[in-house]
Image (cartoon, rainbow, N blue to C red):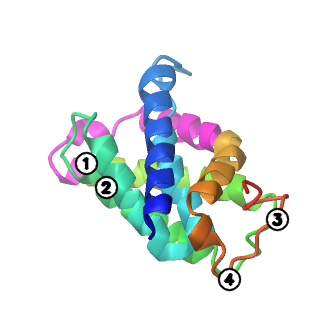
Amino acid sequence: MSRSELGRLTLVVLLFLVVQETVMLDLRIGGVHPDILVLLPIVAGIIGGPSRGATIGFGTGLVSDLFLPTPFGLSALVGCLVGFAVGLATQALDRTAGWLAPVAALAGSAVYEVTYGALGSVLGQPQMLHVALVRIVVVVSVTNAVLAVPAVRLMSWAMAEASTEGMPMSDAGVGAAR
Protein backbone atom coordinates (compact mmCIF):
# COMPACT_ATOMS: atom_id res chain seq x y z
CA MET A 1 0.00 0.00 0.00
CA SER A 2 1.49 3.33 -1.04
CA ARG A 3 1.49 6.48 1.05
CA SER A 4 -1.01 8.15 -1.26
CA GLU A 5 -3.39 5.21 -1.00
CA LEU A 6 -3.02 5.18 2.79
CA GLY A 7 -3.80 8.91 2.86
CA ARG A 8 -6.90 8.48 0.69
CA LEU A 9 -8.12 5.54 2.80
CA THR A 10 -7.62 7.60 5.95
CA LEU A 11 -9.64 10.44 4.45
CA VAL A 12 -12.51 8.11 3.54
CA VAL A 13 -12.55 6.48 6.99
CA LEU A 14 -12.49 9.91 8.67
CA LEU A 15 -15.30 11.14 6.42
CA PHE A 16 -17.45 8.13 7.30
CA LEU A 17 -16.57 8.51 10.99
CA VAL A 18 -17.57 12.19 11.04
CA VAL A 19 -20.85 11.49 9.23
CA GLN A 20 -21.54 8.54 11.58
CA GLU A 21 -20.86 10.50 14.76
CA THR A 22 -22.69 13.68 13.69
CA VAL A 23 -25.53 12.85 11.31
CA MET A 24 -26.26 9.14 11.73
CA LEU A 25 -26.39 9.15 15.54
CA ASP A 26 -29.18 11.74 15.40
CA LEU A 27 -31.07 9.95 12.62
CA ARG A 28 -33.37 7.46 14.32
CA ILE A 29 -35.57 5.01 12.45
CA GLY A 30 -37.72 2.97 14.81
CA GLY A 31 -35.43 3.99 17.65
CA VAL A 32 -32.33 2.68 15.84
CA HIS A 33 -29.60 4.70 14.13
CA PRO A 34 -27.80 3.56 10.96
CA ASP A 35 -24.18 2.41 11.16
CA ILE A 36 -22.36 3.39 7.98
CA LEU A 37 -18.90 2.35 9.21
CA VAL A 38 -20.07 -1.24 8.66
CA LEU A 39 -20.20 -0.43 4.95
CA LEU A 40 -16.46 0.19 4.54
CA PRO A 41 -15.17 -3.39 4.94
CA ILE A 42 -18.01 -4.62 2.74
CA VAL A 43 -17.15 -2.37 -0.19
CA ALA A 44 -13.42 -2.93 0.38
CA GLY A 45 -14.08 -6.67 0.07
CA ILE A 46 -15.93 -6.12 -3.19
CA ILE A 47 -13.20 -3.90 -4.66
CA GLY A 48 -10.01 -5.41 -3.29
CA GLY A 49 -10.91 -8.99 -2.44
CA PRO A 50 -10.80 -10.90 0.85
CA SER A 51 -7.46 -9.64 2.18
CA ARG A 52 -8.22 -5.96 1.53
CA GLY A 53 -11.73 -6.38 2.97
CA ALA A 54 -10.30 -7.95 6.12
CA THR A 55 -7.62 -5.27 6.47
CA ILE A 56 -10.05 -2.38 6.02
CA GLY A 57 -12.54 -4.12 8.31
CA PHE A 58 -9.96 -4.44 11.06
CA GLY A 59 -8.80 -0.83 10.78
CA THR A 60 -12.28 0.61 10.54
CA GLY A 61 -13.40 -1.57 13.43
CA LEU A 62 -10.60 -0.30 15.65
CA VAL A 63 -11.59 3.29 14.87
CA SER A 64 -15.24 2.45 15.56
CA ASP A 65 -14.32 0.73 18.84
CA LEU A 66 -12.92 4.01 20.15
CA PHE A 67 -16.48 5.39 20.25
CA LEU A 68 -18.37 2.37 21.56
CA PRO A 69 -18.94 1.13 25.13
CA THR A 70 -18.53 -2.50 24.09
CA PRO A 71 -15.43 -4.70 24.47
CA PHE A 72 -12.53 -3.10 22.61
CA GLY A 73 -11.68 -5.04 19.48
CA LEU A 74 -15.16 -6.50 18.92
CA SER A 75 -15.92 -4.23 15.96
CA ALA A 76 -12.44 -4.88 14.56
CA LEU A 77 -12.92 -8.65 14.77
CA VAL A 78 -16.38 -8.61 13.20
CA GLY A 79 -15.32 -6.08 10.52
CA CYS A 80 -12.34 -8.26 9.65
CA LEU A 81 -14.52 -11.37 9.35
CA VAL A 82 -17.23 -9.65 7.29
CA GLY A 83 -14.77 -7.87 4.98
CA PHE A 84 -13.01 -11.19 4.31
CA ALA A 85 -16.32 -13.05 3.79
CA VAL A 86 -17.70 -10.45 1.36
CA GLY A 87 -14.43 -10.40 -0.58
CA LEU A 88 -14.45 -14.18 -0.78
CA ALA A 89 -18.15 -14.42 -1.69
CA THR A 90 -17.88 -11.82 -4.48
CA GLN A 91 -14.60 -13.07 -5.93
CA ALA A 92 -16.23 -15.25 -8.58
CA LEU A 93 -18.92 -12.70 -9.44
CA ASP A 94 -18.88 -9.92 -12.02
CA ARG A 95 -17.77 -7.03 -9.81
CA THR A 96 -18.96 -4.51 -12.40
CA ALA A 97 -22.61 -5.57 -11.99
CA GLY A 98 -24.74 -2.70 -10.72
CA TRP A 99 -26.70 -4.93 -8.33
CA LEU A 100 -23.65 -6.36 -6.55
CA ALA A 101 -22.83 -3.50 -4.17
CA PRO A 102 -26.36 -2.99 -2.79
CA VAL A 103 -26.99 -6.73 -2.39
CA ALA A 104 -23.60 -7.31 -0.76
CA ALA A 105 -24.16 -4.32 1.53
CA LEU A 106 -27.60 -5.61 2.53
CA ALA A 107 -26.40 -9.13 3.27
CA GLY A 108 -23.03 -8.13 4.71
CA SER A 109 -24.57 -5.58 7.07
CA ALA A 110 -27.09 -8.13 8.33
CA VAL A 111 -24.33 -10.68 8.96
CA TYR A 112 -22.22 -8.00 10.66
CA GLU A 113 -24.95 -6.96 13.09
CA VAL A 114 -25.99 -10.52 14.00
CA THR A 115 -22.36 -11.59 14.46
CA TYR A 116 -21.62 -8.45 16.49
CA GLY A 117 -24.55 -9.16 18.82
CA ALA A 118 -23.72 -12.85 19.17
CA LEU A 119 -20.02 -12.32 19.87
CA GLY A 120 -20.80 -9.45 22.22
CA SER A 121 -23.11 -11.73 24.16
CA VAL A 122 -20.44 -14.42 24.34
CA LEU A 123 -17.94 -11.82 25.60
CA GLY A 124 -20.10 -10.85 28.57
CA GLN A 125 -22.56 -8.37 27.07
CA PRO A 126 -25.85 -10.37 27.13
CA GLN A 127 -27.92 -7.23 26.43
CA MET A 128 -26.55 -7.24 22.87
CA LEU A 129 -28.90 -10.09 21.94
CA HIS A 130 -32.28 -8.55 22.54
CA VAL A 131 -35.53 -8.00 20.72
CA ALA A 132 -34.33 -4.81 18.99
CA LEU A 133 -31.66 -6.79 17.13
CA VAL A 134 -34.11 -7.41 14.29
CA ARG A 135 -34.81 -3.66 14.00
CA ILE A 136 -31.08 -2.95 14.11
CA VAL A 137 -30.41 -5.46 11.33
CA VAL A 138 -33.18 -4.03 9.14
CA VAL A 139 -32.24 -0.35 9.62
CA VAL A 140 -28.50 -0.84 9.19
CA SER A 141 -28.86 -3.23 6.24
CA VAL A 142 -31.33 -1.11 4.28
CA THR A 143 -29.43 2.13 4.94
CA ASN A 144 -26.15 0.58 3.86
CA ALA A 145 -27.74 -0.93 0.73
CA VAL A 146 -28.94 2.55 -0.25
CA LEU A 147 -25.50 4.09 0.40
CA ALA A 148 -23.53 1.24 -1.21
CA VAL A 149 -22.96 2.75 -4.66
CA PRO A 150 -21.57 6.10 -3.38
CA ALA A 151 -19.46 4.19 -0.84
CA VAL A 152 -18.04 1.98 -3.60
CA ARG A 153 -17.14 5.03 -5.64
CA LEU A 154 -15.35 6.63 -2.68
CA MET A 155 -13.54 3.42 -1.78
CA SER A 156 -12.57 2.85 -5.43
CA TRP A 157 -10.93 6.26 -5.41
CA ALA A 158 -9.20 5.51 -2.11
CA MET A 159 -7.99 2.07 -3.22
CA ALA A 160 -6.94 3.13 -6.71
CA GLU A 161 -3.78 0.96 -6.81
CA ALA A 162 -5.61 -2.12 -5.53
CA SER A 163 -8.51 -1.75 -7.93
CA THR A 164 -6.25 -1.56 -10.98
CA GLU A 165 -4.51 -4.87 -10.27
CA GLY A 166 -6.60 -7.08 -12.51
CA MET A 167 -10.01 -5.96 -11.28
CA PRO A 168 -12.44 -4.93 -14.00
CA MET A 169 -14.09 -1.59 -13.23
CA SER A 170 -16.92 0.25 -14.97
CA ASP A 171 -19.28 3.17 -14.58
CA ALA A 172 -22.16 0.82 -13.77
CA GLY A 173 -20.68 -0.48 -10.58
CA VAL A 174 -17.44 -0.43 -8.79
CA GLY A 175 -14.75 1.77 -10.26
CA ALA A 176 -16.23 4.98 -11.60
CA ALA A 177 -14.40 7.27 -9.18
CA ARG A 178 -11.38 8.11 -11.31
For the point 57% across and 72% down, the residue is 162
Q: Position of residue 143 (x, y in %)?
A: 62, 36
Q: Does the magenta-highlighted stretch encompass residue 133?
A: yes
Residue, disc 3:
170
Question: Which is in the foreground here, disc 4 or disc 1?
Answer: 4
Residues drawn in magenta? 121-145
Density class for disc 4 (Cα within 10 Å; few <14, some 14-19, many ≥20) is few
Q: Is disc 4 placed on a helix, strand or loop?
A: loop
Residue, disc 2:
76
Residue, disc 4:
166
For the point 33% across and 42% down, the residue is 64
Side (left or right) of 10 relative to 173: left
Tell me the amino acid under the disc marked 4: Gly
Sequence-first tag of 2 and 4: 2
Q: Mostly what secondary structure, the magenta segment? A: helix
Tell me the amino acid under the disc marked 2: Ala
| Quadrant containing the C terminus in the rendered view | bottom right
Q: CA distance from mark 3 to mark 4?
A: 13 Å
Q: Is disc 1 placed on a helix, strand or loop?
A: helix
Q: CA distance from mark 1 to mark 2?
A: 12 Å
Side (left or right) of 91 relative to 23: right
Q: CA distance from mark 2 to mark 3?
A: 30 Å
Tell me the amino acid under the disc marked 1: Gly
For the point 51% across and 52% down, the residue is 8
10, above or below 18, in the image: below
Sequence-first tag of 2 and 3: 2
